[in-house]
Image (cartoon, rainbow, N blue to C red):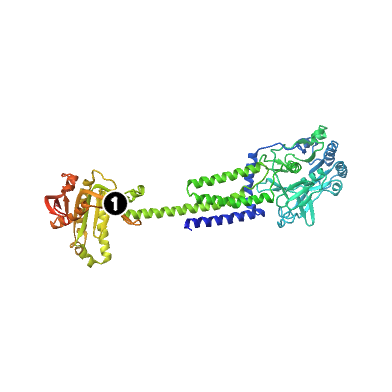
Amino acid sequence: MSGRAFQTLIALILAGLWGASIGLAHMRGDMWFLDRVEATMTDLRTVARGQKPAPPVVTIVAIDDEVVRQEGSYPLARAKLARVIDAIAELKPSVIGIDTLLVDPGPDDGDRQLAQSLGKSPTVLAAAAVFPQGQQQTTNNRDDPLAGVPSAERFLLPLRLFTDVAAVGVVNVSTDRNGTPRLVPLLFKSGDSIEASFPLRVVSVAKGLEPTIEPGRVLLGEQVIRTDIGQTLPLIFYGTRGSIRTISAADVLNGKLSRESIENRIVVIGTTVTGGGDVYPTPFDPVFPGVELVSTAITQLMSGDGIVRDRNVRLADAGFAMGLPLILVGLLAWRRSAIGLIASVCAIVAWLAVNMAAFASGIWLSAAVPMMAALPPALLFGATQIWLGKRRAQHFADQSELLQQVQAPGLGNWLARNPGFLSQPVRQDAAVVFIDLSGFTGLSETLGPNATRELLNGFYQLVDEEVAANGGSITSFMGDGAMILFGLPKPASEDAGNAARCCTALCKRTRDWLDTLPASSGSPIGFKVGAHFGTIVASRLGSGTRQQITATGDTVNVASRLMEVAASHGAELAVSEEMLQAAGRDSEAFKSGALTGPLEARIRGRSGALSVRLWRLQ
């Protein structure tokens, strides 16, 4: 397995383990720290889904500002509340729910009158659970139907006078960290005492059925209510306040109550008076009345049009939590480019579309949990790949720089852009220059390796600078000399002229360099330069794993032998007539010294003589 594949495998394993741990924690309800993210995402999905009409199941009778103004007191006197209940009871509601705590005694006459009114119709009274440190829950045992049910310190129950004639339900709701009610607990416990919630008790009285409690669901006859952890009912809102039909208690007292708004309906009496404090923020309304909140839960229990989040939905969340990071990491590893990033974004968009479609269909898939599971591994893997990519890029840059140092200057970049360059030999005209130090071999025996290396580096540096300044390419350093080509990577009309300027500049620079050396090092050393122009064969020479760009042919051999001609005549430079003619006989390059000749020189290894010019520094 390659290193890259191994890295991807490790990343996939870690991403899967991370996603599985997040999914498992979500199944147990331990992801409370994501409440704010989930709340925000839920609000966005709720608003995107839009408002919709509530089923005509519940009518709210509101103790509002109008009835308080009319009666002149708040809370409403119990005798007045009794009159309201009497007026409602005459129109035959299925059940009346009183969303007002009646835990303290009032005037005896008022309490007796209210108790008599409560007995005229099926009625449910509100109780409250008191928690010492907020909502506490028991161990989450999936086989225990009461696992996770909110455990209260005690219950605030209505007066015994009232509970003798009416049922009781706990009215507490569960809010997220933003204060928005998201869940309605259907059951509460305190010690050995179990109480149904106010919405569940109202619905059970309306249906005439006692609820049956099973793990993850509550049964009302044939109706199955799927619940979340702790037997809680997920809540979704129909819209702003007033989405559920609301009538002022003032209209009831004034005899303006219509039969169709009450008969066979569930009627919930509660407070909406300004400053009453029983309000909650929702996605549609920042001051949503508490009585409409419990009425929303009652409506959804009755009609079954609420939103579902139970163990199966959480299991789907866990699947997304484990699958999404694997998909994102896999896509980023598959295409480590813009394509992989685009594919990852498409995967996220597809998941969001599925999530939104499920929410609109009444299934509350978590948005925060898969995000928490997917984003850290994807970002970490992406950042790691960027870091590794930068390391690889730096490695290749270092290799490229090394190639430029080893290969002829300019040829490395040309090869990078044109990998097929000289894959087949090419015949072309070029200027070939050789330079070599004389007397250096004997000197190196006395200098030692380190001093010899330093001396050669100084010589190579000046050669490299002059060749680069005149547009040539050093194809190789040969011991104490160098071979230089003018005409690679592409031949040009000024190649011979550039070579001529380079030859004379090399002579000047080398002479000056020798003058700077100590007498023990510089005096035994001399140099010689040969230059020729003609046809060469440029190619890559070597094996399949190691190749070098060079030139071969008679022109190269002649240029090399011309150094011997220069040395035998005491000149720094020997230039062939072909080179002089190609560079121009009046070339400025040779005017800084004395150009003599021509002379007919015998070239070792070549038949016939060659017309040569000699150049010396003045």
Residue drawn at (61%, 44%) of the image: 354
x, y percent for residue 328: 54, 50
Q: Quadrant of residue 255?
A: top right
Judged left or right of residue 411, residue 127 is right
Horizontal and vertical percent position of residue 374: 57, 51
Q: In screen coordinates, is 505 left or right of 232?
A: left
Taking 51 as reference, is 340 left or right?
left
Closest to the observer, 331 or 24: 331
Specify few, some or many for label 1: CA neighbours under 10 Å numbering under 14, 14-19, or 20 or more. Answer: some
Q: Nearer the viewer, residue 341 or 453?
A: 341
Where disc 1 sits, the SS reads strand
Residue 10: percent from left, percent from top: 53, 57
Question: Residue 247 versus residue 234: which sits nearer the camera?
Answer: 234
Give the amino acid at mark 1: Ser
Q: Nearer the viewer, residue 55 or 47?
A: 55
Residue 582 visible in the snapshot: yes
Q: Residue 496, image x and y in percent?
A: 21, 46
Q: Label 1, on which residue? A: 539
Q: How many marks?
A: 1
